[in-house]
Image: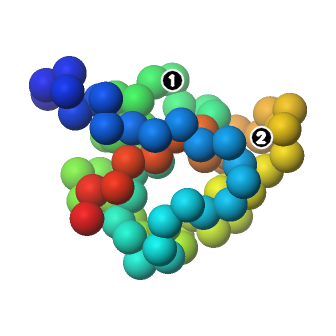
Amino acid sequence: MAEQAFQDWIDHDGAGCPVSDLARVQVQFRADRDRRTAERDSGPEGNTAQVYSNSWIYSAGSTAAADITAYRVVA
């Protein structure tokens, strides 16, 4: 995979879902080792953002494995 694709990721700060609930996204959870792992686990078509509704919002300093720390819109 081209390195350019990995530059499309946007860091997320836990302030809520930044995209439409119907947007298809790939997400990186705090527990993911890296973005390549996150991309593989999210699948090439991603999922709708609403699937991750409980992971978009978290407080500063959170260490929960299910926190979304980055995302990429794929459709």
> In the rendered view, does 36 fall on the left or right side of 69?
left
Question: The disc labelled 2 sits on which kind of residue?
Answer: Ala
Q: Residue under label 1, please give it.
A: 33
Task: Identify the residue at horizontal 22%, vertical 33% (top origin).
Answer: 5
Q: Closest to the observer: 22 or 41?
A: 22
Which quadrant is home to the C terminus?
bottom left
- Residue 72 location (% of width, % of height): 38, 48
Q: List the single residue furthest toward the bottom.
A: 22
Q: Above or below — where is 11 with respect to 73?
A: above
Of the residues under marks 2 and 1, which one precedes in the sequence?
1
> In the rendered view, does 42 fall on the left or right side of 56?
left
The local secondary structure at tag 2 comes to loop
- Residue 35: name its quadrant: top left
The local secondary structure at tag 1 comes to loop
Task: Identify the residue at horizontal 51%, vertical 23% (top origin).
Answer: 33
Q: Residue under label 2, please give it.
A: 64
Q: Above or below — where is 60 with respect to 45?
A: above
- Residue 25 location (% of width, % of height): 38, 58
Question: The disc labelled 1 sits on which kind of residue?
Answer: Arg
Judge the density around disc 2: few (<14), some (14-19), many (≥20) Cα neighbours within 10 Å. Answer: few
| Image marks 2 and 1: residues in contact by CB distance under 8 Å | no
- Residue 37: name its quadrant: top left
